[in-house]
Amino acid sequence: MKSAVVTGASSGIGAASARALAAAGYHVICAARRLDRLNDLASEIKGTAIECDITDASQVANLAAQVGPTLNVLVNNAGGALGADPVIEGDPEQWRRMYDINVIGTMQVTKALAPALIASGAGTIINIGSTAGRWAYEGGGGYTAVKHALAVVTETLRLELNGQPVRVSEIAPGMVHTEEFSLVRLGDQSKADAVYAGVAEPLLAEDIADAVQWVATRPQHVNVDLMIVKPIAQAAAHKVHRES
């Protein structure tokens, strides 16, 4: 059976992606910090739960050791946004934390699992980026900076792995309504709800999971470099149709 690792699998896009890959026949190793949630998910999809904070090198090494010698798919989903302050009012600790998770954490996991992906003879790396990695918007300086960085890391990785049997893709979602993303970012439920107010149909985690499954299951010679996925209501970061 083919195997997949999904980071940040305890909720949202990560959990949905784990379910989608399991439905496609993969044994999914679900990695995240919240082991209680992972255990429930792993039981549901007959996968494996591994507690892992991707910013902790020792925990990443433990993840790699448990994955084993070969791996077919790595979904680098763990990430997130903190704060929405203007750049000149930004919190340096929030910026550092976002960079540590979205960029350094992704690098650490990819570095640790690259040998297993190569050894499989048919590996795929899917980095979950964001339209924030393509557009700047007010109040998004920190998050857009780290997602732009992740986009360039993905492009560089594709160049560096050229000639190896590993595909490298980025899926860049726009507005996705999940339980935690905006709440964690803004720290207030009413503010989080306001992000989606009047938007008839924002994307759901399952929409992105469907894209993950599709990219992962293309013929191995097909590399989907970049997939940008937005709800029809969102033309750009600053232009979202809201019903009154």
Image (cartoon, grey):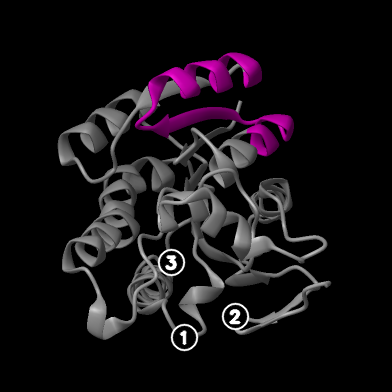
The CA distance from mark 2 to mark 3 is: 36 Å
What's the amino acid at mark 3?
Gly
Position of residue 53 relative to residue 232, above or below, is: above
Mark 1 / mark 3, whichever is N-terminal = 1
* Circle on res. 163: 3
* Circle on res. 136: 1
Mark 2 / mark 3, whichever is N-terminal = 3
Q: Are marks 2 and 1 in contact (CB under 8 Å)?
A: yes
Residue positioned 24% across, 57% down in the render: 97
The CA distance from mark 1 to mark 3 is: 34 Å
Tell me the quarter of the image containing the N terminus.
top right
Q: Callout 1: 10 Å neighbours few (<14), some, many (20+)?
A: some
Percent x, y of residue 93: 18, 61
User: The residue tagged with tag 1: helix, strand or loop?
Assistant: loop
Front residue (pair 18, 180): 180
The CA distance from mark 2 to mark 1 is: 8 Å
* Circle on res. 162: none
Give the magenta part as a residue range: 19-45
Percent x, y of residue 115: 32, 45
What residue would you read off at disc 2?
A: 237
Residue positioned 38% across, 69% down in the render: 150
Q: Nearer the viewer, mark 2 or mark 3?
A: 2
